[in-house]
Amino acid sequence: MYERILLAYDGSREGLIALREGALLARTCGARVFLLSVLPLADSSASAPAADGGYGGAVATHVDTYNALLSRGVEVLKQLGFDPVARLVVGEPAPQIGAFAKEIGADLVVLGHRRRSFLERWWSGGAGAYVTEHVSCSVLIGRCPVSDEAFAAELAEAKAAGEAP
């Protein structure tokens, strides 16, 4: 059913729920997994990289943190036997997710969901709804927590089947 699944991961509790749910779905479907972390910018004019390919100012201080969380996400996926394509980008999350989904030909995007107040939604907009306007594939909002025990059982099963390193 799904062959190319994009997991948007921000390191939050909700992001981990989506990562686990998406990874288990990808395993069931035999899909290829792509992992994307987006370092959001308060000022989009600061999104251009410096001449050396790095970022300056406040963005540079957060790149290491986001690279570390991306590495943690990759490790979780590798434990399930995946060899994920992982990317860190800088910008507004919804358009970046949409652009990467198009680039890789994703047929499913998995996002986390963080409950926000009416005022927060009004002020910042609905990222999940915005993503649906920028992708031409299905979008899954991961909301089913996979317990540590259930996930460990899936890891053990993957190892027993020779799928995990």
Image (cartoon, helix red, strand yellow):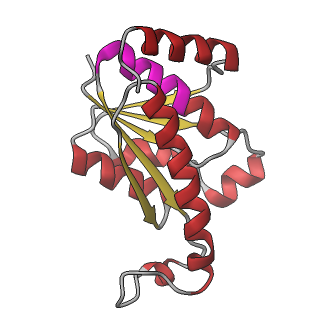
Left or right: residue 3 compared with residue 40: left
- Estimate the x, y position of residue 13 in percent, counting from the top left: 69, 38
Quarter-of-image position of residue 95: bottom left
In the image, farthest residue toward the bottom? 51
Classify 40 as above or below 5. Answer: below
Say if residue 113 shows up in the picture: no
Q: Which residue is more in the foreground, 105 or 79?
A: 79
Q: Of helix, strand and loop, which mostly describes the magenta segment? A: helix
Left or right: residue 106 compared with residue 12: left
Q: Residue at x 75, y 46 (%)?
A: 118
Say if residue 56 shows up in the picture: yes
The answer to if 147 sits in the magenta stretch is no
- Estimate the x, y position of residue 32 in percent, counting from the top left: 28, 31
The range drawn in magenta is 19-30
Q: Which residue is more in the foreground, 83 or 4?
A: 83
Q: Quadrant of the C terminus?
A: top left
Quarter-of-image position of residue 149: top right
Classify 46 as above or below 142. Answer: below
Classify 51 as above or below 24. Answer: below
Q: Residue at x 49, y 63 (%)?
A: 92
The answer to if 23 sits in the magenta stretch is yes
- Estimate the x, y position of residue 119 in percent, counting from the top left: 76, 53
Q: Residue at x 36, y 18 (%)?
A: 163
Q: Residue at x 33, y 36 (%)?
A: 83
- Estimate the x, y position of residue 136 in percent, counting from the top left: 27, 39
Q: Quadrant of the N terminus?
A: top left
